[in-house]
Amino acid sequence: QVRLMESGGGSVQAGGSLSLSCAVSGYSGKLCMAWFRQTPGEGREGVAVVASDGSTRYASTVQGRFTISLDKSRNTAFLQMNSLKPEDTAMYYCAARIGLYGWPLPREEYEYAYWGQGTQVTVSS
């Protein structure tokens, strides 16, 4: 059974940094891990994706500020968020896709079968 365990998040002032981590267990083979975010009344936005070959993809809203990485030895994905803005405030969810993936890397909610519980990120102005 695939399980995701998130940690990190919290509150920070604009311009600050936060990091998120997501440990995945119970899988084998190729893997894509992604971070999505959601605000009340909105759908989930794919923020960043990392594949098991190290390739990445970012939303234009976070390009240059967020960095996603995958430590395969620890089966853990990390999202380093710098230069945070109030509009980055959201619930952040880790997601995993097991098996084949194409290019561009998947960044839509329906493309991921496994999800973490979510962690709140709040950026104050």
Image: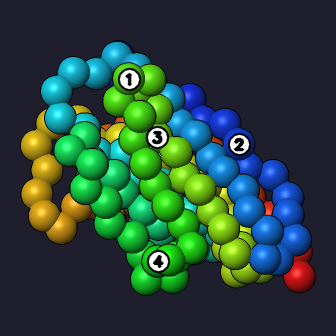
- Cα distance, mark 2 to mark 4? 20 Å
Query: Which amino acid does the dot numbered 4 rest on?
Result: Gln
Q: Residues within 10 Å of mark 1 (few under 14, many from 20)?
A: few
Locate residue 26: give its quadrant.
top left
In this picture, is 89 found above or below 2?
A: below
Q: How many marks?
A: 4
Q: Which x, y percent locates residue 89?
A: 73, 70
Task: Please report contact status of discs 1 and 4: CB closer than 8 Å, yes or no.
Answer: no
Judging by the rendered image, the residue that carries numbered circle 2 is: 8
Query: Which amino acid does the dot numbered 1 rest on?
Result: Ser
Which residue does the image show at 56% across and 29% down from the upper left? 5
Task: Please report contact status of discs 3 and 4: CB closer than 8 Å, yes or no.
Answer: no
Query: Which amino acid does the dot numbered 3 rest on?
Result: Ala
Judging by the rendered image, the residue that carries numbered circle 4 is: 63
| Residue 44 visible at all | no
Task: Please report contact status of discs 3 and 1: CB closer than 8 Å, yes or no.
Answer: no
Judging by the rendered image, the residue that carries numbered circle 1 is: 73
Of the pair 102 and 68, the residue shown nearer to us: 68
Judging by the rendered image, the residue that carries numbered circle 3 is: 77
- Cα distance, mark 3 to mark 4? 17 Å
Q: Which x, y percent locates residue 58?
A: 39, 70
In this picture, is 21 found above or below 49?
A: above
Which residue does the image show at 11% across and 57% down from the upper left? 102
